[in-house]
Image (cartoon, helix red, strand yellow):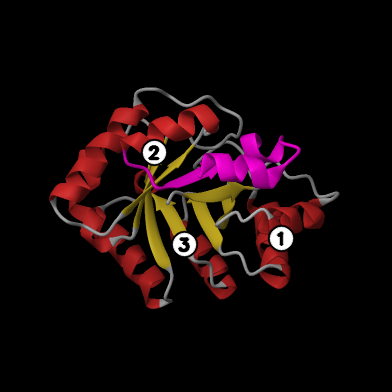
Amino acid sequence: MVEISTSILSVQKEGAIKKFYNLEAAHTNYFHIDVMDGEFVENNTKEIMLEYAETIKQISNTPLDVHLMVKDVQKYIEEYIPLEPNIITFHYEAVKNKEEILELINEIKRNNIRVGLAISPKTKPEEIYDLLPNIHILLVMTVEPGKGGQKLIPETIQKVQNAYDYINKNELEVDIQVDGGINEQTAQIVKEAGANILVAGNSILSSENYAEIIRKLK
């Protein structure tokens, strides 16, 4: 079964708590927390996302799926560990070398949190194949990181397929998450390519019936 991680990037403060309750009732599997620092990507959401994550932790049992689009990965890992998210994902492109990446992976694991490693559209999955045995989730960005509401980049589908084939061939226990431009039509395409966790924001939040759209995406 495909899992749905609902991005709350576009949620406005007014009425946010009601939306969080409604999303939980609609059986989203995760709340996707898009943390942007204004450096690794242009937008800056670090304050509002931390506020939303803290609120959700107080009112909901739905797990947090934290996606760090930041340069100082260590700093933000330390900031989110106390919230006990289910997943912390950081970007391969944000870290200088693989030794440092492994250190960050191990720190997240020591706190009983699942580790995700994200790759942007220009990064080839082959670059991180040697890291896959150390992580739980590979996040393939299907749009450029940093903005909501973009259309899925068609070339990224093959990356999902290639990663899925490698994971299967090597009998690795790694989920493939996709993020960007996910709606009813593209969900089917990425699912067929091997993705099993879909991040969706606008397609869910713009719907009048969260439960119906989440059911269709699944």
Q: Quadrant of residue 191?
A: top left
Disc 3 residue crowd, few under 14, some 14–19, many 20+, Cα 10 Å: many
**Which is more foreground, mark 2 or mark 1?**
2
**Which is more foreground, mark 3 or mark 1?**
3
Q: Which region is colored magenta?
A: 194-218
Q: Give the amino acid at mark 1.
A: Glu
Q: Quadrant of residue 126?
A: top left
6 or 132: which is nearer to us? 6
> Is 196 in the magenta?
yes
Tell whether 92 sits left or right of 46: left
SS at mark 3 in the image: strand
Q: CA distance from mark 2 to mark 3?
A: 20 Å
SS at mark 1 in the image: helix
Q: Going from the N terminus, do you reach mark 2 or mark 3 first?
A: 3
Badge 2 is on which residue?
191
Q: Residue at x 39, y 47 (%)?
A: 196
x, y percent for residue 102: 28, 62
Badge 3 is on which residue?
87
Q: Residue at x 52, y 71 (%)?
A: 81
Q: Is residue 39 visible?
A: no
Q: Is residue 86 above or below residue 67?
A: below
Q: Residue at x 52, y 24 (%)?
A: 151
Q: CA distance from mark 3 to mark 1?
A: 17 Å
Tell whether 211 sits left or right of 104: right
Q: Give the amino acid at mark 2.
A: Lys
Q: Which mark is residue 120?
A: none
Badge 1 is on which residue?
51
Q: Is residue 20 above or below residue 8?
A: below
Q: Is residue 56 visible?
A: yes
Q: Going from the N terminus, do you reach mark 2 or mark 1 first?
A: 1
SS at mark 2 in the image: helix
> Is 88 in the magenta?
no
